[in-house]
Amino acid sequence: MAGFKHLVIVKFKEGTAAADMLKGMQKLVSEIDAVKSFEWGQDIESEEMLRQGFTHAFLMTFDSKEDYTAFVGHPSHVEFSATFSTAIDKVVLLDFPCVVAKGSA
Amino acid sequence: MAGFKHLVIVKFKEGTAAADMLKGMQKLVSEIDAVKSFEWGQDIESEEMLRQGFTHAFLMTFDSKEDYTAFVGHPSHVEFSATFSTAIDKVVLLDFPCVVAKGSA
């Protein structure tokens, strides 16, 4: 699925219940129609040197950059982000128009 | 699309022709059937503090972890990785079974 993607990779602080964070994220995306898809995963395979401590990837897809911008400003997102940011040790965010170079994805 | 995902985020070295790298990657995924989808993007929106210098995300999808493992060991991948690694300033790799929590993606 092409569209506009919001990619978040994180290393949670020690002691964080990643399952609780995920539950909050699932509630968030279910509440906001602009989020067309939400996929995530926990690394099980990469070498530590390449993973660099990051453990989880979260990927949301929107129809357009405008929909993404609306999501970012949505009160539920603002509230969740405040909670999320207290739970993370490291984070990288990338937001980009997605190019599908092979497959329907 | 669920399956097994190979996520690569990079900051290329200054002077690297990202388009050439991408061309090599597209050739690679077109040659290897195990790669079911290949999506990528260049960040246009994230704040520098959150992007942390990373500029590009590359996401490949496989039917299974075994297909991913076969891809990693494929001679074309080994060759491309050697070239790719000379072009990058920073990289994070995450490899994970993908959970589709919303949408068909």
Image (cartoon, coloured by chain):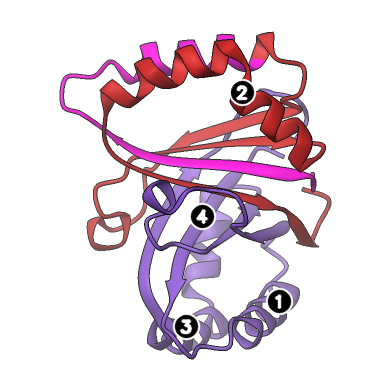
Chain colours: A purple, B red
Q: Is residue A44 magenta?
A: no
Do circles 3 and 2 both sit on a common chain?
no
Q: Is residue B27 magenta?
A: yes
- The foreground one among B98 and A71 is B98
Residue occupying image coordinates x 69% and y 58%: A39
Q: Secondary structure at mark 4?
A: strand
Residue that numbered label 4 is attached to: A7
Q: Subunit of mark 2?
A: B
Residue A84: mark: 3
Between the C-alphas of marks 1 and 2, the distance is 35 Å
Which of discs 3 and 2 lies nearer the camera? The answer is 2
Total numbered badges shown on the rendered structure: 4
Q: Subunit of mark 3?
A: A
Q: Secondary structure at mark 1?
A: helix
Circle 3 Cα neighbour tier, 10 Å, few/some/many (<14 / 14–19 / ≥20): some
Circle 2 Cα neighbour tier, 10 Å, few/some/many (<14 / 14–19 / ≥20): few
What's under tag 3, amino acid-wise? Phe
Q: Earlier in the sequence, mark 4 or mark 1?
A: 4
Between the C-alphas of marks 4 and 1, the distance is 15 Å
Residue that numbered label 1 is attached to: A26
Between the C-alphas of marks 3 and 1, the distance is 13 Å
Q: Which residues are magenta?
A: B1-29
Query: Above or below — where is B20 with respect to A4?
Result: above
For the residues labelled 3 and 4, say whether their Cβ atoms are less than 8 Å apart: no
Residue that numbered label 2 is attached to: B73
Circle 4 Cα neighbour tier, 10 Å, few/some/many (<14 / 14–19 / ≥20): many
Between the C-alphas of marks 3 and 4, the distance is 15 Å
Do circles 1 and 2 both sit on a common chain?
no
- Residue B47 is left or right of residue A45, and the answer is left
